Image (tube, rainbow, N blue to C red):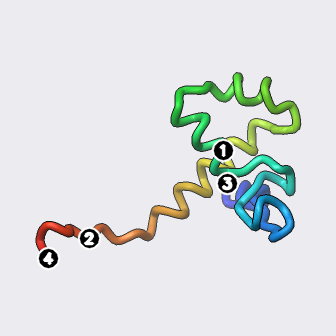
Amino acid sequence: MENLLQRITFNKDILGGKPVIRGLRISVEMILELLAKGATRQEILEDYPDLEPDDLQAALLYAHHSVAGETIVDRLAA
């Protein structure tokens, strides 16, 4: 499953270096936004024919890795 992350690439010349799928101009952020707004995987794949099912899984895995090590700080306790 970790090899899915190889689908996520970074290039300062593509979308300002944001994480994108396989060098395409399709950002991880956009995929996550579409999913959060209720788009189905099938709808996303139909709307973006360059995407593959593993690309969507890679975006989710990347998001998980991005937040997995975060520390929660209770600002009210400070």
Q: What is the CA distance from the residue labelled 1 to the residue labelled 3?
A: 22 Å
Identified at 20% across, 69% down, the residue is 75
- Compared across the picture, whether 63 is left or right of 68 comes to right
Q: Residues within 10 Å of mark 1 (few under 14, many from 20)?
A: few
Please name the residue shown 60% across and 53% down the image: 61
Label 4 with label 3: CB-CB less than 8 Å: no
Q: Nearer the viewer, mark 2 or mark 3?
A: 2
Would you name the residue on which mark 1 appears?
30
Q: CA distance from mark 4 to mark 3?
A: 39 Å
**58 relative to 9, above or below:** above
Tag 4: Cα neighbours inside 10 Å, few (<14), some, or many (≥20)? few
User: What kind of residue is marked 4?
Assistant: Ala
> Residue drawn 61% across and 57% down?
62
| 17 with respect to 76 (left or right) | right
Q: Inspect the image, locate mark 2, and give the three-letter code of the amino acid beneath it.
A: Val
Q: Mark 1 vs mark 2: which is more N-terminal?
A: 1
Label 2 Cα neighbours within 10 Å, binned few <14 / some 14-19 / many ≥20 = few
Q: How many marks?
A: 4
What's the amino acid at mark 1?
Answer: Met
Task: Check residue 1 in the rendering and tell me which mark sits there, or answer none.
Answer: 3
Question: Badge 3 local density, few (<14 within 10 Å), some, or many (20+)?
Answer: few
